[in-house]
Image: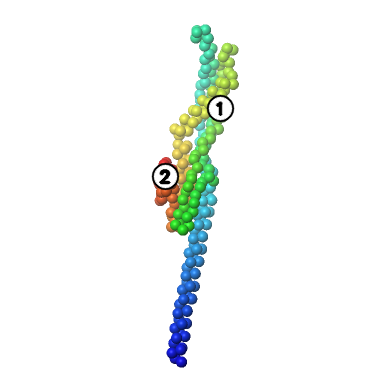
Amino acid sequence: MRKLLRVLFGIFVVLFFMFSGVVVYNYLTKEKSDDMQYNTALIQEQLKNVSKLVVTEATFSQVMTYKDQQKYLMNLLSFDKKAVVIINAKATVGYDLSQLKYQIDEKNKVVQILFIPEAEVNIYPDYKILDVEQSKFNPFKGEDYNKINAKVKKDLEDKIEKSTLKSNAENRLISELSKILIVTQALGWKLEYQGNTIQSDKDLVLDMAL
C-alpha cells in the first residue's frame, strides 16, 4: 500500500511540475507578446505624430532696376525704357512627412525608414513697379513684365540658396525624425536608414546627405 502511495505521489509531483511549467511558459509568452504589441503601438503612434508638414519660412526684400534698349538705324538711334521694381517676397521650404515611408520589423526590433521626401521650395513674390520711364518707340509691353517676373524669381532663388532657409528647414526635419530615434532607443529597438543604424542626430545628418 505504501509503495502504491509513493508511486501516486511521484506521479502527482511530476504532473504538478509539468502543469506549473506550462502555466509559467504561457504567462511569460503572453507577457512578452503584450509587451511587443505595446512597444510597436508606441512606435506607430510616434511615427503618426511626425507625419505632418514641416515648413520653415523667410521673407526677402530688394530693389531691382529693369532696363531695356531698342536701337535703330545701325545703332545710331536708341530708345530706352526702365523701371524700379520693389520686391517683398515670402519663401518657404517644407517637408511633407505624410509621405515618409517606413517598415516595422517586430521580430528583430528594428524600424527601417525607407523614404524621406525631398524639400519643397515655394516662392510667393509681391512686387511693385515704380518710376517707369519709356518712349513711344519703346513702350512697356507684356513681355517686359514676363522678363521682370523671371528676373525676380531668379534673384529670389539665388538669395534662398545663399541664405540659411534650407539648412533651418533641414534642422527642423531632423528634429522631427529624432523623436522616432528617442522612442526606439528607449524601447531597446534600432532605427535604420539606407542600411545604416541611426544612433544620434549626427547620423541622420550624414545619411540624409548621401
Q: Quadrant of the C terminus?
A: top left
Does residue 127 sit above or below 1 in this rendering? Answer: above
Question: At 41% from the left edge and 50% from the top edge, which residue is drawn?
Answer: 197
Does residue 24 sit above or below 203 in this rendering? Answer: below
- Say whether residue 86 is visible: no
- The percent position of residue 20, horizontal first and vertical second, equals 47, 75
Question: At 51% from the left edge and 38% from the top edge, which residue is drawn?
Answer: 120
Residue count near mark 2 (Cα–Cα under 10 Å), binned few <14, some 14–19, many ≥20: some
Tell me which amino acid carries mark 1: Tyr
Question: At 56% from the left edge and 24% from the top edge, which residue is drawn?
Answer: 146
Question: At 51% from the left edge and 51% from the top edge, which residue is drawn?
Answer: 47
Tell me which amino acid carries mark 2: Asp
Q: Circle 1 sits on which residue?
A: 127
- The percent position of residue 1, horizontal first and vertical second, equals 46, 92
Q: Nearer the viewer, mark 1 or mark 2?
A: 2
- The percent position of residue 195, horizontal first and vertical second, equals 42, 48
Q: Please state which of residues 162 and 98 is positioned toward the viewer in this rendering.
A: 98
Residue count near mark 1 (Cα–Cα under 10 Å), binned few <14, some 14–19, many ≥20: some
Coloration of the structure image: rainbow
- Say whether residue 50 is visible: yes
Q: Please state which of residues 126 and 109 is positioned toward the viewer in this rendering.
A: 109
Q: Earlier in the sequence, mark 1 or mark 2?
A: 1
Q: Circle 2 sits on which residue?
A: 207
Q: Compute the Cα span from label 1 to label 2.
A: 39 Å
* Label 2 secondary element: helix
